[in-house]
Image (tube, rainbow, N blue to C red):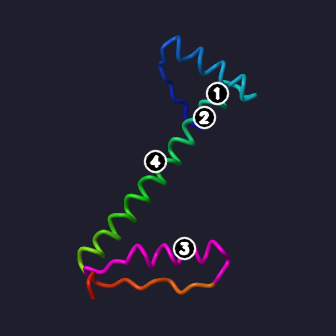
Amino acid sequence: MATTTIRIEDELKLRVAVAAEIAGKTTHAFILDAISETVAQMELDTQFQSLAEQRWSNIATTGKTVPWDATKEHLAARARGLRSRRPAARKPGV
């Protein structure tokens, strides 16, 4: 396992120590968890952005979208536990 050194201000070091104690962790474990959670969130954000770009590209290419009213009805039915056919994408006004 590699070692990485970070320099932090005394105030932040104290805050981390207090937070770690409250969490019942060592400062080291607390910092590792914070880094791990931040990396995981960044990976999720990147995946989300990629998916959004793919979907936007598809809309730009086809001109097709799913009407919001149809989407609301579909989601409401699913929330009530009913089966509902997923609304089809189509060009607006068609």
The kind of secondary structure element at disc 3 is helix
As drawn, is 59 to the left or to the right of 1? left
Instruction: Find residue 47 and report its image quarter.
Output: bottom left
Q: Are marks 1 and 2 in contact (CB under 8 Å)?
A: yes
**Neighbour class for label 3 at 10 Å: few (<14), some, many (≥20)?**
some
The residue range painted magenta reads: 62-82
Give residue 3's position: percent from left, percent from top. 55, 30
Mark closer to the chain start, 2 or 4: 2
Among all residues in the image, which is located at the extreme top? 10
Q: Name the residue that disc number 2 marks.
A: 32
Near-viewer residue (54 or 28): 54
Quote the CA–CA distance across marks 4 and 3.
28 Å
Q: Residue at x 30, y 76 (%)?
A: 58
Q: Is residue 79 magenta?
A: yes
Q: Name the residue that disc number 3 marks.
A: 75
Q: Is residue 9 magenta?
A: no
Mark closer to the chain start, 2 or 3: 2
The kind of secondary structure element at disc 4 is helix
Q: Residue at x 66, y 74 (%)?
A: 80
Q: Name the residue that disc number 1 marks.
A: 28
Give residue 56's position: percent from left, percent from top. 30, 68
Give residue 26's position: percent from left, percent from top. 70, 25
Tag 4: amino acid: Met
Tag 1: amino acid: His
Above or below: residue 32 compared with residue 82: above
Give residue 39's position: percent from left, percent from top. 50, 44
Q: Quadrant of the N terminus?
A: top right
